[in-house]
Image (tube, rainbow, N blue to C red):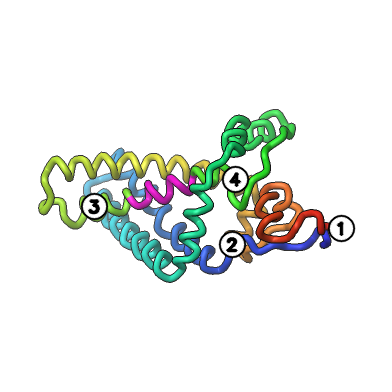
Amino acid sequence: MSHDKMILKHPLSVRMFHYFLILSFLPLAVTGVLLYFKPLSDAAMHLTMQIHAAAGVALTIACASFFFLAYDRVVLFIKRVFSVSLADLKWFAVLGGYPQKLILRKKVPVPPMGKYNSGQKLFGIFVLIGGSLLILSGWILWGFPHAMPRGFVSLMGDVHLIAGIVLTLFLCVHLFLGVYMFDDFKAMILHGKIPYEEAREMSSLWVRKEVIPISENKC
């Protein structure tokens, strides 16, 4: 296998879902921050709330569509992110080697990873759980605030706020590392493929078990 070989990491269905997440969650995050701090006029804040609600509907449709149309991908994703081993603890012990690369400009040993590294798996868990709570609480707060007990609505408001803050913070880290790992960023946004050599370095277990044995890489 030549060094310029490309491997499909993100199929079209996943990329399409990612596009819809970008178009829905980014407006949600921005308008959510504005709604929390309320820096604009009443008219502008009303428009912000409408955009927030519309983006929430779009996010709900995107998630529901992907769940039903690509159920096998959802199941596989859940299986991957909830697969925990000792290697994950070792990965977090050095934070994947990213601080050493970014700050100290040196590489440290990192345990071999599957398709997703331990940080991506943690992010995936927060997206699954936090995203579900965000959507559920958002619909209750927007569509049925007067049909629910006041204490429950207040609780849903707290859940919505906490989930929104956590996911927005994770999004900032995700965007930064997405640009840092530019080949993977291009793969998710464009063609879905990453170089074999990068896959071998970053996701060696995935390459070995699911793509092609690394030993077959003849130079």
* Rendering coords of residue 29 (x, y %): 39, 48
Q: How far across and how far down the image is residue 93, in percent? A: 60, 30
What residue would you read off at disc 3?
46
> Could you tell me how far apart the alpha carbons at marks 4 and 1 are, in whole angstroms?
26 Å
Mark 2 or 3, nearer chain start:
2
Indicate which disc, 1 or 2, sits on the residue closer to the N terminus.
2
Q: Residue furthest right?
A: 219
Q: Earlier in the sequence, mark 4 or mark 3?
A: 3
Amino acid bearing label 2: His
Q: Secondary structure at mark 2?
A: loop
Residue type highlighted by circle 4: Asn
Q: Earlier in the sequence, mark 2 or mark 4?
A: 2
- Per the model, the C-alpha gap separating discs 2 and 4 is 15 Å
Q: Residues within 10 Å of mark 3 (few under 14, many from 20)?
A: few
Residue in the image at 56% along x and 44% along y? 176
Q: Specify whether residue 105 is painted magenta.
A: no
Secondary structure of the residue carrying numbered label 4: loop
> What secondary structure is found at the residue carrying circle 1?
loop
Q: Give the amino acid at mark 3.
A: His
Q: Main secondary structure of the magenta part?
A: helix
- Spatial CA distance of label 2 from label 3 is 38 Å
* Tag shown at residue 10: 2
* Above or below: residue 6 compared with residue 141: below
Nearest the viewer among 205 and 167 is: 205
Q: Nearer the viewer, mark 2 or mark 3?
A: 2
10 Å crowding of disc 1: few (<14), some (14-19), many (20+): few
Left or right of 162 in this view: 183: right
Q: Nearer the viewer, mark 2 or mark 4?
A: 4
What residue type is disc 1 on? Answer: Lys
**Residue wearing tag 4:** 117
Q: Which residues are magenta?
A: 123-132
